[in-house]
């Protein structure tokens, strides 16, 4: 069992999502960086599809009620383990131990990207992200909240899956399926200072002027403070329309670049709606980098054939 002592700004249960239900209006959801959660699961000795925690920006504090192996990936953060000492009690002066007395709290640091063993009753303190936005936590056995449509992921838009965690919540764990790997170091991609995204033409590209396409590929945008798991709202050069009016709602996919009436592009992420009525000028090939893009981060678009500048 996991006991949430401090849930932080936004901590959710995530796995690899629930693909295949868009025809019923259900988005994929799942970890914003699926590969990071898969790596955390491998480090903790779990199957890659096991559910873990996605921790946003401010960190969190939790207690485990049984001995577990945990692993963190994603944004770097300070990690601290607190546990009660089991050192034998004081004896004669000549054999008295030099370590903590029984019941005293021992503290030891942990690392993002390496397995970490926790005894029953230990408290895990995960600090704020030093750079980037999100850190993923896997626990041996995986988090076994009740699945919905084959996934344990929290969908912040539709409300499917468990709600975002609050202080005092308790999460069940499954039985461990294997030992953690003997890993000394994992190499993870650094959090980029600037995000470069390959974008392909969207279904409503003809609703925009040629100048809009030049602006999209030639301008620097910044991530807005109102971005979330649904989408990354960008601020920069407005994209002028060639066709006035609105269109009936039509299907949306992960990475769709929708343009509301103000001309500022919005990139849809894991919890995106499955339909929308604003024109889609393009579709981003891979939105993973946006999982770590803080407000103010620069975003540039390029064609898939050219590559980033």
Image: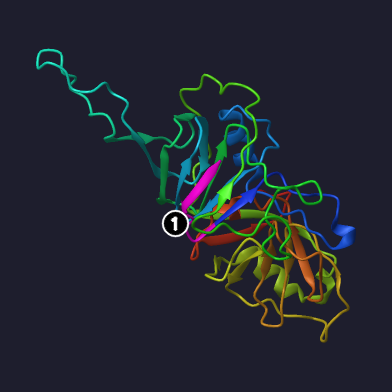
Quarter of the rendering containing residue 22 = bottom right
Residue placed farthest to the top in the image? 94
Q: How many marks are shown on the rendered structure?
A: 1
Indicate yes or no whether the magenta region holds residue 7.
yes
Residue placed farthest to the bottom in the image? 245
Q: Position of residue 134 (x, y in %)?
A: 53, 51
Is 205 located above or below residue 269 in the figure? below
Q: Is residue 198 visible?
A: yes
* Span colored in magenta: 1-10
Please give the name of the residue rendered at 66% of the width and 53% of the height, measured from the top-left corner: 287
In this orientation, which residue lies closer to the viewer: 12 or 106? 106
| Mark 1 nearby-residue class (10 Å; few <14, some 14–19, many ≥20) | some
Please give the name of the residue rendered at 59% of the width and 40% of the height, measured from the top-left corner: 36
Give the residue number, with chain letter if any, for mark 1.
58
Is 197 located above or below residue 43 in the figure? below
Q: Is residue 309 visible?
A: no
Which quarter of the rendering shows the N terminus? top right
Q: Position of residue 165 (x, y in %)?
A: 56, 57
């Amino acid at each position: 069992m996991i006991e949430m002592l401090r849930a932080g700004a936004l901590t959710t249960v995530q796995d690899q999502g629930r693909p295949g239900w868009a025809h019923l209006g259900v988005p994929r959801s799942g970890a914003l960086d699926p590969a990071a959660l898969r790596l955390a699961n491998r480090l903790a000795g779990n199957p890659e599809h096991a559910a873990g925690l996605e921790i946003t920006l401010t960190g969190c504090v939790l207690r485990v009620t049984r001995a577990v192996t945990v692993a963190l990936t994603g944004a770097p953060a300070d990690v601290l383990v607190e546990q009660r000492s089991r050192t034998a009690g004081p004896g004669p002066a000549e054999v008295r131990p030099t370590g903590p007395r029984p019941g005293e709290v021992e503290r030891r640091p942990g690392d993002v990207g390496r397995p970490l063993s926790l005894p029953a009753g230990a408290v895990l303190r995960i600090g704020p992200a030093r750079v980037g936005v999100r850190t993923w936590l896997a626990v041996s056995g995986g988090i076994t909240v009740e699945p919905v449509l084959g996934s344990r992921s929290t969908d912040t838009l539709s409300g499917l899956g468990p709600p975002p965690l609050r202080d005092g919540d308790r999460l069940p764990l499954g039985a461990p399926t294997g030992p953690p790997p003997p890993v000394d170091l994992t190499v993870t991609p650094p959090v980029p200072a600037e995000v470069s995204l390959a974008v392909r033409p969207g279904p409503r590209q003809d609703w925009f002027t040629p100048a809009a396409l030049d602006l999209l590929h030639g301008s620097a945008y910044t991530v807005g403070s109102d971005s979330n798991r649904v989408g990354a709202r960008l601020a920069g050069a407005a994209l002028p329309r060639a066709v006035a009016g609105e269109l009936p709602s039509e299907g949306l996919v992960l990475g769709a670049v929708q343009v509301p009436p103000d001309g500022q592009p919005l990139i849809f992420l894991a919890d995106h709606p499955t339909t929308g009525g604003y024109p889609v000028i393009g579709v981003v090939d891979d939105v993973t980098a946006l999982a770590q893009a803080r407000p103010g981060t620069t975003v540039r678009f390029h064609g898939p054939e050219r590559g980033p500048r």
